[in-house]
Image (spheres, rainbow, N blue to C red):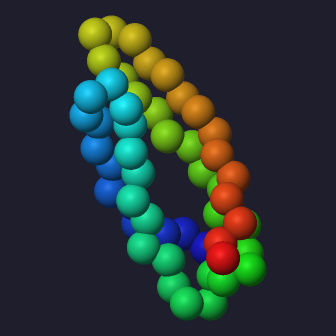
Amino acid sequence: MKVRATGAFSGGQARCVVALPRNAKGKTLRGSITVRAAGAKLTRAFSYRVG
């Protein structure tokens, strides 16, 4: 399932907000977030069980 996400970076922390459909409960959301700044790039993967 593909979902739309909105990202923000503030105070040295990256944040990603995702709106999930109701049928996502009990499933695992997996993805990654990438931040690019000053010529550098950092990517971190995440996995979250939707409750």
Above or below, 37 against 13 in this view is above
Q: Position of residue 49 (x, y in %)?
A: 71, 66
In which quarter of the view is residue 28 placed? bottom right
Q: In the rendered view, does 8 fall on the left or right side of 41?
A: left
Q: Position of residue 17 (x, y in %)?
A: 39, 59
Give the tally of numbered discs: 0
Q: In the rendered view, does 9 fall on the left or right side of 4?
A: left
Q: Position of residue 13 (x, y in %)?
A: 37, 32
Quadrant location of the N terminus? bottom right
Quadrant location of the C terminus? bottom right
Residue at position x 55%, y 90% in the image:
22
- Between 31 and 17, the residue placed more toward the observer is 17
Residue at position x 50%, y 77% in the image:
20
> Hey, which residue is sitting farthest top in the picture?
39
Above or below, 28 against 39 in this view is below
Residue at position x 29%, y 36% in the image:
9
- Between 3 and 19, the residue placed more toward the observer is 19
Residue at position x 65%, y 72% in the image:
50
